[in-house]
Amino acid sequence: MDLRKCLAEAIGTFWLTFAGCGSAVIAAGFPEVGIGLLGVSLAFGLSVLTMAYAIGHVSGCHLNPAVTVGLAAGGRFPMKDVVPYVVAQVVGAMIAAAVLYAIASGAPGFDLAKGFAANGYGEHSPGKYTMFSGLLAEIVLTMMFLFIIMGSTHGKAPVGFAPIAIGLGLTLIHLVGIPITNTSVNPARSTGPALFVGGWALAQLWLFWLAPLIGGVLGGILYRWLSEEPSAQITGIAPASGLPPTRPAT
């Protein structure tokens, strides 16, 4: 386990959760000038894009257990490092939710019952979508996210543009998914807010681990089958030992 890489993953996931969920909790519904669904979608995409350039060379910038597991399934990440990365990501998301709560609760009328950017289905879906709809959407959206990541970080993809493709891909995913589940595709991002909302959010959290992990594995395996040529693992820049360089993910 490389503590430097794990710390980078924790910081990156903190930023994704704080900036993305913060945009929803603080800025989306601000009277008259709120950023709305489009703004929240862009916030999530921009959080990944900025961190990919900032820490992609350190850890590969996964920021998401489903990405880490999906890359491992696709042969682009070592299995031995999956658990440390996932733990770091969840810790980063939990700290982000705590900081966001400390800030947001300072506003008059703040109410955790409004959701705190937690993910949900049924009565807790923004559009009241069923559990099956939420499950299917999260699987498909996460699968396509991994497909984008695997492709844009491939050795034959244009160099230096992967963070842009991945960030815009996550923006598009949120544009589709927010009405359905408030968009997870990331178990760590879902866990942070759910711990503060409690109740229904914790009861439904299983879906936002299961579906993204299934989608991530499917996306990783699908792209590995589609493009059999080997490419560098997404773990940050390799040490100066003659090994080929690795590339940032998300």
Image: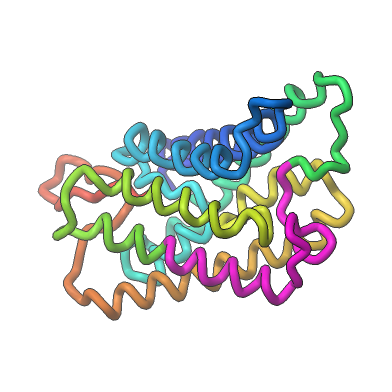
Vertical arrangement, residue 210 with respect to residue 42, above or below: below
Q: Is residue 32 left or right of residue 244?
A: right
Residue sitting at the far front? 32
Q: Is residue 182 visible?
A: yes
Place of residue 39 in the rendered image (x, y in percent of width and height, measured from the top left): 55, 37
Kindly identify the residue that appears in the image at 81 percent across and 19 percent down: 106
- Residue 144 drawn in magenta: yes
Kindly identify the residue that appears in the image at 15 percent across and 51 percent down: 243
Kindly identify the residue that appears in the image at 16 percent across and 51 percent down: 158
Q: Main secondary structure of the magenta part?
A: helix
Q: Which residues are magenta?
A: 117-145
Q: Quadrant of residue 193?
A: top right
Q: Is residue 79 visible?
A: no
- Depth order, front residue of 192/152: 152
Place of residue 204 in the rendered image (x, y in percent of width and height, measured from the top left): 78, 62
Place of residue 130 in the rendered image (x, y in percent of width and height, measured from the top left): 76, 72
